[in-house]
Image: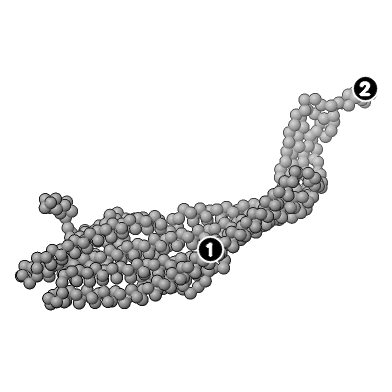
Amino acid sequence: MKFTLFMLTFLLPPGTVLAGEFSVTLKAAEESALSASNSYKAAKLSAAAADVAAKAAGSGLSPRLALEGNLRYNAVVPQISLPAALGGARPLGDNWNYSVGPAAYWTLFDGGSARALYDGSRKLASVRSAETANAGRQVLLAARIAYFQLQLALERVYLIGENLQLSLAQLKDVSLGVKTGSRSRLDGIRAAQETISRRRDLLRARAELSGTLRDFGFATGIPVPCGTELPLDSRMAGRDYGGAGAADLFIKADPYEVMLPGLLPAASGTVDPALPAAAAFGESAAAYGLSTRAYRAERFPKLQLSARSGLDYPNGPNLYSFLQTSAGLSLNLPLFESGRSSDKEKESSLNSAAALEKRDEAALAAEKDFEKALDDYRALVAEQNINIEAVDAASEAAKLAYEAYKAGGGTWLEVESANLKALQAKTTAAETNAGILMKLALLDSLGPTR
């Protein structure tokens, strides 16, 4: 057993090797998440595509100009029989026929179908815009939660490290007392056991911090630096942890006091009346409503004006090209289509009603989530007031327990218990701080844009 411990010590020599510091602020995490998120970028591209589609739909309201041409070959050319005095039989044209020239078309009346399709396309663009805003809010919320979890993991590592330093200092005192005979061998063993427990706790906390850091990098798109196996909080650089503090990376994040003021206004706000998640369904309902109008208009007559000027060949029996200019009106009135327009109109109407139901449900869900998060936030604030008292009491108790032990009026078990309770109280306060920030982030994601 001793040989095994010796080999482990040889393979993992103590000492701190500072390779670098990874410092990231909440603002930088938010900006990086928005610029790196594939879902957010996809939503923005979809919104841009919908804007272009709306512009394309608007072209149906304007005249259309085209260059038209056709070339045809007739194997048989009809002839007209004439007396010999008039030249005999003459062909009525030529085997080759062509016509080429500009043409213009303008729909004068279609029951409002083209206008409804254009307005519907604009509504769809609004839907995509709302979806983009909602995607941005979700990405921002995920980035903030990942950052707060990273900050909490750092705080846990730091608090355990501080407790380990205290255990090391107390172990040194107890070991000296054991040598002088003023402390029992059992107290020395128990003090050493407590130090070992804190070292193990620190190792586990650092491993959890490493995983949290990678989750943070994935959520924000910020590259994770090398040496993330067992990182430490930047406040722990250069401190002695009895050989348990070696690290290649030190991480620095915004403290709780810096992040809180920017999110506090969310607790006094309300749900955004134009919440993108609900607005997207509302705009979708409007788009379906316009589609209903477009399909209804298909049952109206369609009147179209056309004008054309072209170079044609041949000019009847005269085998030469000539300039032909023409204009016309065309009327199209559907008489029978197996109920297609009526069915499509009904489909769009039902889809519009469904989208309105989804809009109302999204609004109610957002209201519920907001009120629930607000209740949780208020409960956490009340709990934190208790936690502050608990931390003060536990810290004072740990100090008095050790002083009593040094004076001979207490046992080491009492000291160990008091130290552990102080660590638990501080950890609970740190977890509550993180919970407060997360609830504020959720409230902010549901509130009006600030």
The residue that appears at 57% across and 66% down in the rendered structure is: 274
Q: Report the colour scheme.
A: one colour
| Residue ID for mark 2 | 84
Mark number for residue 365?
1
Q: Is residue 68 above or below residue 261?
A: above
Where residue 350 appears, x then y in whole percent? 66, 54
Query: Does 430 sit above or below residue 100?
Result: below
Nearest the eye: 378 or 259: 378
Say what amino acid the circle numbered 2 marks: Ala
| Residue 51 shown left or right of residue 178 in the figure | right
Q: Determine which quarter of the picture holds residue 224.
A: bottom left
- Residue 448 position (above or below residue 231): below
Which mark, by number, is residue 377?
Answer: none
Q: Total label count?
A: 2
In this view, the residue farthest toward the top is 84
> Could you classify mark 1 by the number of other residues whose Cα lies within 10 Å: few (under 14), some (14-19), or many (20 or more)?
few
| Residue located farthest toward the left when viewing the structure as drawn | 180
Q: Amino acid at mark 1?
A: Ala
Tell me where residue 374 appears, x and y as whole percent: 46, 70
Say left or right for 26 vs 100: left
Dot 1: element: helix
Disc 1 to disc 2, how far (Cα)?
A: 94 Å
Q: Secondary structure at mark 2?
A: helix
- Residue 433's quadrant in the figure? bottom left
For discs 1 and 2, the disc positioned in front in the rendered view:
1
Q: Which percent across, then down, holds residue 445?
A: 48, 65
Instruction: Of the two numbered discs 1 and 2 on the same chain, state the one appearing first in sequence.
Output: 2
* Residue at image coords 59%, 62%: 360
